Amino acid sequence: MWTSAACVWLDVACWSIEPKDRPTFVDIMLQLEEIGNSPFITTSHASFRSLQQTWRVEIESCFAELRARDDVRTYVNSSDND
């Protein structure tokens, strides 16, 4: 599993509403070992900064799309009430 996916899985799984769905400590340790042994950990600071900038742009784009969808829904709902 790629490190980013491993981190997301770990975050989501550990905060599961149902305690039975949360990972065991062994699962957590195995996932952390995988993350620690991945090449992502050895990424240079410059490369990591570049990745962060890419992620920032992607996140901003997603938020803009969500805001646009919300604006459309708000407009449609307000038009229905007129």
Image: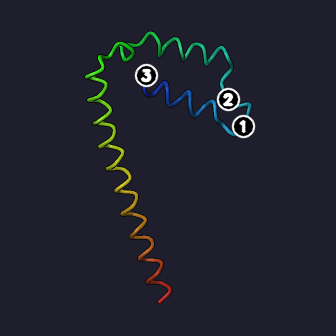
Mark 2 residue type: Arg
Choose the circle earlier in sequence order: 2 or 3. 3
Quadrant position of residue 25: top right
The residue carrying pointer 3 sits among few (fewer than 14), some (14 to 19) or many (20 or more) residues within 10 Å by Cα, namely some
**Is mark 1 in CB contact (under 8 Å) with mark 2?**
yes
Left or right of 19 in this view: 47: left
Q: Position of residue 13 (x, y in %)?
A: 61, 31
Give the secondary structure at mark 2. Answer: loop
Q: Who's the residue at 40% across and 57% down the image?
A: 66
Q: Is residue 67 above or below residue 55?
A: below
Q: Is residue 74 left or right of residue 27?
A: left
Q: Which residue is mark 2?
A: 22
How is the protein colored in the picture? rainbow
Q: Position of residue 71 (x, y in %)?
A: 40, 69
Residue 49: x, y in percent? Answer: 29, 28
Inspect the image, locate mark 1, and give the three-letter code of the amino acid beneath it: Glu
Q: Could you tell me the amino acid type at mark 3?
A: Thr
Q: Secondary structure at mark 1?
A: loop
Q: Quadrant of residue 10?
A: top right
24 in relation to 67, above or below: above
Residue at horizontal 36%, vertical 45%? Answer: 59
The residue furthest bottom is 82
Q: State how far apart marks 1 and 2 are (Cα).
A: 7 Å
The number of callouts visible is 3
Dot 2 crowding, Cα within 10 Å, few <14, some 14–19, many 20+ = some
Q: Earlier in the sequence, mark 1 or mark 3?
A: 3
The residue wearing badge 1 is: 18
Q: CA distance from mark 1 to mark 3?
A: 25 Å
Provide the residue designation for mark 3: 3
Q: Residues within 10 Å of mark 1 (few under 14, many from 20)?
A: few
Q: Quadrant of the N terminus?
A: top left
The dot on residue 39 is none
